[in-house]
Image (cartoon, rainbow, N blue to C red):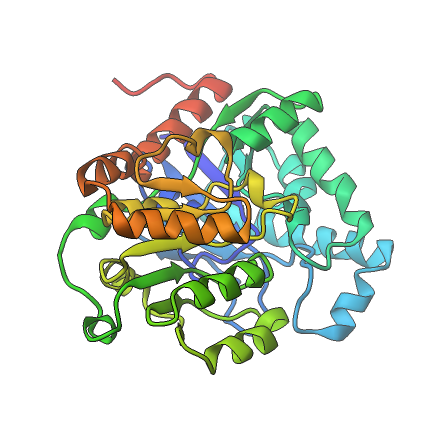
């Protein structure tokens, strides 16, 4: 029975992400241990817990931008980072003994600060899941860059979330690489025809966004959209990042904008089915937005909802029902075109079906087996 030990930058129970979707769909003959970082506000699993076929536990890896100001300041000291890593290795070895992992485990890292620990434990091969650029988030110090370089150089295979990053990493001399984009729980987003009650009586058209309302969004684009569609409903489903709360408060007091906050993941499809057009209004001037391959694209399309977005990574070009805009005026025009000529939802759903998380899990497992020299399942 093969063993996979996954070193993550988020907690197993914290959110629905690529890691949870993929690992929970690995074949039943895999033993999987998920090692997560500490969270100062949520519970930590110092002993192993289990969720389906995945066991998980907490280790005190270096962690940026915590709620503890003292901890954040201490991270500026090299000895403190080394001390954290030493403690994390002790805890990981303890959890590995509880789990019963041997020296032939496959190790996969998506947390650059966990890489020194992952490298130190006995393993058969080491992979890196490059699902985000760690430096796309604010507050990442300069001392963190060598950690990512070490993880990329030390991996026998790197899974890369987008074609943009794939080409960039290859040009920088990293490899071997395997393109492994994001996906969707296809059955969940196509299973019913219900619509969120709050949208049943909403003014039409409903133009919607799901996800974190963050510094990635172009508020210039949103202002232009509001002026063009003053009698519509422009709705945002998701939490608001602290850095944009003032901007959101300004929009929330005006028509046509509606912010409903974070909603249960299980109900997201009901909200999307109430949209006439789905949005990804990220600022195209941000150097990182052109490289992303977000789950929400597949969630929109799985519901048969057309999407207007800032430019994305090349593998998404030509996706049915997906239109790119590069300026505020073009953004408004693309939305208007989608409203006037709504595409047939069947090709949109078929594109989402081809990117179901079960497909991504099979692709990752095949890549790991090849890198580790594990015999393929019959």
Q: Residue 188 or 273: which is nearer the viewer?
A: 273
Task: Please state which of residues 179 and 68 is positioned toward the viewer in this rendering.
Answer: 179
In-front residue for pair 50/290: 290
Identity of the residue drawn at 20% across and 74% down: 197
Q: Is residue 92 visible?
A: yes
Up/down of 351 relative to 173, above or below: below
**Residue 343, image x, y percentages:** 23, 42
Q: Residue at x 33, y 72 (%)?
A: 231
Estimate the x, y position of residue 276 in percent, counting from the top left.
27, 57
Seen at 42% across and 61% down, the residue is 13
Measured as percent of width and height from the top left, residue 137 is found at: 65, 54
Label count reads: 0
Q: Nearer the viewer, residue 312 or 175?
A: 312
Q: Residue at x 38, y 27 (%)?
A: 363
Task: Reply above or below: 73 against 7.
Answer: below
Q: In the image, 231: left or right of 102?
A: left
Quadrant, the N terminus: top left
Task: Say if 198 sits above or below 326 in the image.
Answer: below
Figure quadrant of residue 27 = top left
Q: Is residue 123 visible?
A: no
* Image location (x, y in percent) of residue 191: 15, 51
Quarter of the figure with residue 277:
bottom left
Single out the residue that lies furthest toward the bottom: 253
Q: Quadrant of the C terminus?
A: top left
């Amino acid at each position: 029975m093969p063993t996979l030990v996954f070193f993550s930058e988020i907690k197993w129970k914290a959110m629905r992400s690529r890691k949870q979707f993929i690992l929970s769909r690995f074949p039943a003959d895999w033993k999987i241990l998920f090692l997560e970082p500490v969270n100062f506000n949520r519970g930590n699993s110092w002993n192993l817990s289990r969720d389906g076929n995945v066991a998980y536990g907490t280790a005190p890896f270096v962690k940026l931008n915590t709620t503890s100001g003292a901890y954040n300041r201490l991270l500026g000291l090299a000895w403190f980072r080394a001390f954290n890593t030493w403690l994390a290795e002790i805890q990981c070895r303890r959890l590995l003994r509880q789990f019963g992992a041997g020296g032939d485990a496959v190790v996969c890292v998506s947390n650059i600060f966990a890489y020194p620990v992952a490298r130190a434990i006995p393993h058969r091969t080491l992979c890196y899941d490059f699902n985000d650029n760690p430096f796309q988030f604010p507050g990442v110090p300069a001392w963190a860059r060598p950690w990512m370089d070490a993880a990329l150089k030390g991996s026998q295979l790197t899974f890369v979330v987008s074609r943009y990053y794939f080409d960039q990493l290859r040009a920088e001399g990293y490899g071997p690489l395997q393109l492994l984009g994001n996906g969707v729980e296809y059955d969940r987003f196509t299973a019913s025809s219900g619509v969120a009650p709050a949208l049943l009586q909403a003014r039409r058209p409903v133009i919607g966004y799901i996800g974190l309302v963050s510094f990635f969004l172009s508020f210039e684009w949103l202002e232009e959209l509001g002026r063009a569609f003053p009698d519509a409903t422009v709705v945002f489903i998701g939490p608001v990042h602290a850095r944009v709360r003032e901007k959101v408060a300004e929009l929330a007091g005006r028509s046509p904008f509606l912010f409903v906050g974070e909603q249960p993941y299980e109900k997201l499809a009901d909200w999307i089915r109430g949209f006439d057009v789905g949005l990804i209004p990220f600022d195209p001037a941000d150097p990182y937005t052109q490289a992303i391959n977000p789950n929400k694209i597949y969630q929109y399309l799985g519901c048969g909802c057309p999407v207007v977005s800032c430019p994305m990574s090349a593998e998404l070009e030509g996706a049915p029902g997906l239109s790119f805009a590069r300026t505020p005026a073009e953004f408004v025009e693309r939305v208007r075109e989608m409203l006037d000529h709504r595409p047939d939802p069947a090709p949109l759903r078929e594109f989402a079906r081809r990117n179901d998380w079960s497909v991504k899990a099979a692709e990752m497992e095949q890549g790991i087996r090849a890198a580790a020299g594990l015999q393929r399942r019959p």
